[in-house]
Image (cartoon, grey):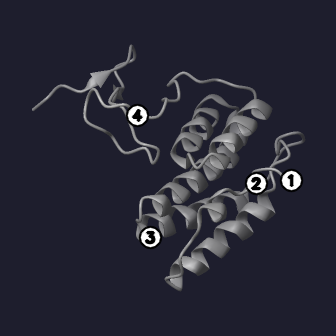
Amino acid sequence: MHDRERDAEGRARNARPRDSFGRPLPPGSAGVPRIPDDLDLPPDRTLGYAQQLLDDGLAFNAHEVLEAAWKNGPFAERQLWQGLAQLAVGLTHIQRGNPKGARTLLLRAAERLARYEPEPGGEHGVDRAGLVAHANALLDRLAAGAAIGPDELRPALRGR
């Protein structure tokens, strides 16, 4: 059994390069740039960065940015950031050709985003209703076995 790479707190980390869908590549391969494990941005920058990654077709990297906000942000906003991160993982599963995983994560994302009750200033301009509708539309397409194009995997986190 191989020892896993660990950070200073002892959490397992994998420094292997990854492809654009977040899948590990063989050591020494050229992958897409990784999101730093200690990323800590204010909400506006987090959403802008995640949106750019989604627009570039890098849903897995967007998930990592949103997950950092979920882990580093205020507890009162945790459900929002978890829902956004789960949405990005659902998109990643579609990109990877895993409809079962996509359905599971898109359902979780839609439920979490629909239930989120923001405190004043805790919504950060996120279009929750639009994202829930987008997740549900993707779920309908997955259920129908319909093809999902790249443009459908670039939802607007905030109204455009």
Q: Which residue is pictured at 67% across the width and 36% down the height?
A: 75
Give the image quarter of residue 115.
Answer: bottom right
Q: Which residue is mark 1?
A: 160
What is the distance, in whole Å, between disc 3 and disc 2 at their CAs?
A: 21 Å
Q: Are marks 3 and 2 in contact (CB under 8 Å)?
A: no
Secondary structure at badge 3 equals: helix
Secondary structure at badge 4 equals: loop
Residue 89 x %, y %: 52, 53
Q: Are marks 1 and 2 in contact (CB under 8 Å)?
A: yes
Q: Which residue is mark 3?
A: 99
Q: Earlier in the sequence, mark 1 or mark 3?
A: 3
Q: Nearer the viewer, mark 1 or mark 3?
A: 1
Q: Nearer the viewer, mark 2 or mark 4?
A: 4
Q: Are marks 4 and 3 in contact (CB under 8 Å)?
A: no
Q: Which residue is mark 2?
A: 156
Q: Is residue 40 above or below residue 140?
A: above
Secondary structure at badge 2 equals: loop
Q: Nearer the viewer, residue 150 or 129?
A: 150
Q: Nearer the viewer, residue 6 or 156?
A: 156
| Residue kind at label 3, given as amino acid type | Pro
Q: Quadrant of the N terminus?
A: top left
Q: Earlier in the sequence, mark 2 or mark 4?
A: 4
Q: Which residue is mark 4?
A: 31
What is the distance, in whole Å, between disc 2 and disc 4 at their CAs?
A: 26 Å
